[in-house]
Structure formats: C-alpha cells, structure tokens
Amino acid sequence: MDLSILTAAAINGLLLGGIYTLVACGLTLIYGVLHIINFAHGSLLMVAMFGVYYLLTVFKIDPYVSLFIMVPAMFVLGYVLYKGLIGRFSSGKDENILLITLGLSILLENIALMFFKGDSRTITVAYSDTMIELGPTLVPLPKLISFAVAMLLCLALGWLIQRTDTGRAIRAVAKERMGARLVGLDVDKVYAISFGLGLATLGAAACLLMPIFYVSPTIGHVFVLVAFTVVVLGGMGSFLGAVLGGLIVGLTESFGGLFLGESLGQIGISLIFILILLLRPSGLFGAKA
Amino acid sequence: MSDHLHAARPVPWALHLSLLALAVAFPFVFPSNFMVNFGVMALFYAFIGQAWNISGGFAGQMSFGHVAFFGVGAYVSTVMQMRFGFSPWWGLPGAALAGALVAGFVAVVSFRAGLKGSYFALITLAFGEVLRIISNSVDITGGGLGMLIPMKSGVANFQFEERSGFYFLILLFAAASVALAEWLRRSRFGARLAAIRENEDAAKALGIDVLSEKIKVLVLSGAMCGMGGCFFAQYFLYIDPTIVFGVDKSVEMLLVSMIGGAGTVYGPLIGALLLASISDITRVMTQIQGLSLVIYGGLLVIIIAYLPNGLIDLFRRRGGQPGGKR
C-alpha cells in the first residue's frame, strides 16, 4: 500500500482522535474522578450541538465564538442536573446513577426526535472549505482548529484539576469522600461542580464539532461507546491517558476503515474496549486497582 | 396469597391461574387484529423482559447488552432457514443454543475477569456492538440490507393463518418464563442468586461458587433471549443489524424489568403491559415520533427516584401486603 495513503489515514485518525479526546475529557472527569457513570454523555453532547446549531442559524453567532456561551451554559446545566436530579435521587448507588442517566438520555434523545425528526443537519461557515496542505494530504482548516483547541482545552482542564483549589477539592473528594467531608468540604457541591465541568467540556466539544460534523437526535450513539473506550483505555481519571487514548482510538478507527472496509472497520473500537476491560481494567495510565 | 413474601413462600396458585385464564381468554374477547397484536407485543416484551430479569434482577447482574443474545438467536434461526433450508421450528432450539453459547462466552470472560456492576453493563454493551458490526459486514447475514423471510402460510412454516396462533405461542413462552421466575423465587438456586446479588463476598464466604452460578444464570437468560429473537424474526418476517442488535432492544428489556420491578416474578409483565399500552396509545392518538419513549424514559427516572422496587410495589401496598420484614 502506498505510504502517502497510510500517512493520510494517520493524519485523519489523529485529527479525529483530538475530538474524541475532548469528549472523553469530560467523561474522564465525571467517570474517572467521581466514579459516576454518565450514560447521558452522548445525548448531552447532542443537546450542546443543537445549541451551537441554533446560535449560528438564528443569532448568526460563529461556532467558535459560541464557545464563550456554550461552555458556561453547559456548566450551569450540569450543575443543576446534578443538584436537582442525579445526586438527589441516586441515593449514592452506582447502578442508580447509571439508570437515571440512561433514563435522561432516552428522554433527551426522544424529545429531540419529536422536535427535529430523524434528519441530520450540518452548518456552513465561511471557512468550511478552506484546505490546508499537510504532508501528502489536504486537511480542512476547521479540523485542524478543532484538534488544536481540543488539545489546549484538555491541558487547561488537567491544569485546573492539578493546580487550583477547586481541582484539589475534586481530587480530595474522589480519593476520600468521608475525609473530605470531615475537613469541611461540601461534598455534594464538589460533585455538582465536577459534573458541571464535565458538561462544560461537552459544550466546547460541540462548538468544535459543528463545523466539521453533523448533528442529529441520535448523534450521541456515535460518541458514547467511543468516549467510554477512550476513558477506560487511558485509565480512569487520567487526563494524559485520555489524550493518548483518544488519539489511539482515532487511529484505530481510521486504519480499521482503511484495512477492513467502512463497515467492519468500526469493530476495532469495541474490541479495544472489551480487551482493555478484560486484560487491563486500570488502563494505560490508571493507578493499579 | 397474603403471605407470599414470607418464609414459607407457598405458590400463589390462585394468582397464577387466574392471570393465565385471563390471558387465554383475551384473544377471544378482543379478536381484532389490533388487539391481538397488542397482546403479542405485550407478551413478547414480558418474555424478553423476564429473560433480562433472571440475570439482571434475580442475580443482580445488570446488563446493557442482552440484545447480543437476542440478535444472535434471530440471525441463527433465520440463517438456518434461509441459507440451509431448515424448518423455522428447528430455528427455535438453534436460536436458544446460540443465545446460550454467546451468553456463556460473555459470562465466562467477563465474570472471570471480575467485572461487575457498571463495568459488566458496559462490556455487554460492547459485545452487542461487535455482533452488530459483524452481522452488518458478512455476506451470510445479508449485511446491512438484512434478511426478508418469505411469507408461507401454514403452521409447519411457523406462519399462522390467524394472528392468534402467534399469540398462543408467545403466551406459552411468557407463561413458562413466569413459571421459571416463580421457581427461582423458591429454589436453592434462586436463593444463591439472591445472595450473590445482595453481597458477593458474603455469598463466597458462605461457600457459594459465585462464578459458576453467575455463568449458569446468564446462559439461561441468553437461551431465552435467543428464543425471543427467533420469535421476533418469524413474527415480523424481517431482520437487520440495527433492529435486532440495536441498543434500543437491550434498553427495552431493561426498562420493562426495572419499571415493573426487577427481581420479582410479575415485574416484567407489568412493565411490558405498560410499554405496549403506551406505545399503542401514543401511536393511535398522536403522530409524534418518539413520544412513547419520552414517557418511558421519564418513568424510569421517576421510578428510580420514588419507587426503587418498581411499579409492583404499588400492587403490594394496595393488597395490604407488608414488604419483607414487617
């Protein structure tokens, strides 16, 4: 096979992986640090993407400018959802959280179906068709921007968790809930903030995705298993792991499609997910369980 | 019947038999196609919901991927019929075997690796995806186009002249699944499963072979799902990867069981009647796509919040039956 085809596939895989990384960063915070399985992650991304879509079509706000609206908006949504629904009714049980977020995703998806029907929508912006030459291949400019911003945001989130007081509180609660409560942390509030931060990254991901992807009510399905794979592969709660996991998954998808064809090529992600869970559930960078 | 939760646990024969009599009478009282179809769908969901309930409820091994066993049953029975000329009736044991084998494989690898709780739920989801992608990509299954089963009337072809033929067949399945659940409620095997559900470490300390019990129950559940898949294919005469391996089916099985009451004998039946009713009512009254699932998703959240044991609790309270300890 021609080397330039392989290089092109690798570049495409990495660019795709950048977006997966960003979607998964939010999940790794929620799932990895707080041990909450947010099954509605994909549908909440869908909600954010429709938000970006309408900000552009109704208010003529560029998707990249929408970052400044969607990120805080999704944070607030996450905070409220946790306080009002997930944290309130789960009685602290892992399985209940999974079921509540499952119910939430069914609700969101089908409400979206009622309003938007099944069709997928795309947006066009002035720079949609701008191509940049990258080695042997031409890459759309928005894909490059998305990749770069996604990486920056992951770093920012990692910094926030490692270096700020809020981040310290989140890590403290994740490690030792009782101890954190004893030293005076409002555990419930920290959970809500983390959930909000996880959703804020979805808001960012939506802004970066809209110029290069489409939105439909069931778009969440595309991302849910991928995001869980990235998180598990990278190791729970590891941001470096999420970045690496995202890139590996992107490459797997790109090369899978190249060698196995479009249909069978998708199998790689599910297989990685299964194998990692079976053989190394702590992931590449996770602490030994 | 008043003490069916107490230690001696006599079989509530009056309840079982009167419900069975009602179910048998149903197609005679409401012979219209619409109503019989409603009955078939309700019993179908009750059956696959019960299959989920046996492993997800009684043994507490919540799965998001039961569709793997269901879809494999649908495909194996249809491929046997269409590609190898078997009678569709042979498809039924074939589907059960296929469902059991896949479930056995999933159970052995996942439970041996120590996966439980949410991790087990997620890995079953991935297994379902793998099977969906394979069925979408190989020739023998017809790929993404799926398979159309030609209509050949006659009981020998699994095609009943009257819809009620399907009704009584699925009633037989559903009744057998209720009998199985009733047996689980009273048997040593069921008691071991309950011990595993409540506290796996404690169950191990009691000398229960946790791994083998969990594998057994998933195999049993998988066999039932496989049969459900075969029935589905013969009733709708069409299958494709998205329909029989889609996450939606897994979720429906889980919903039916959780909303009705997981780990109870009649929970899945209650959930299934509700699901079938909501789906038919919203389809007749409105043209809005997805409304029935909006109601169902909302119900799931409300149930988890306020009735963690499912709708069956409403009946218990109304019947004046104290729950458990009192």
Image (cartoon, grey):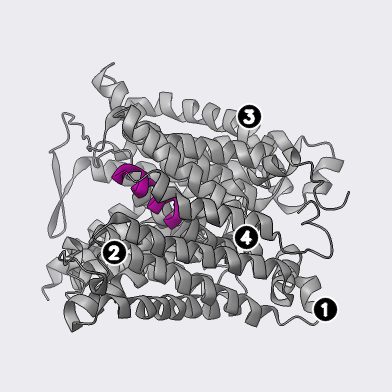
Give me the chain letter of mark 1.
Answer: B
What residue is pinned by disc 3?
A: A84
The answer to whether residue B126 shows anywhere in this view is: yes
Q: Amino acid at mark 2?
A: Ala
User: Is B4 positioned to the left or the right of B87 in the image?
Assistant: right
Residue bounds of the magenta highlight: B32-44
Between discs 1 and 2, the one toward the N terminus: 1
User: Is B316 positioned to the left or the right of B88 in the image?
Assistant: right
Q: Residue at x 51, y 57 (%)?
A: B49
What residue is pinned by disc 1?
A: B206
In terms of secondary structure, where does tag 2 sit? helix
Q: What label does residue A223 carry, if any?
A: none
Q: Amino acid at mark 4?
A: Gly
User: Looking at the picture, do discs 2 and 3 lie on one chain?
Assistant: no
Observer-side mark, 4 or 3, equals 4
Q: CA distance from mark 1 to mark 3?
A: 41 Å
What residue is pinned by disc 4?
A: B57
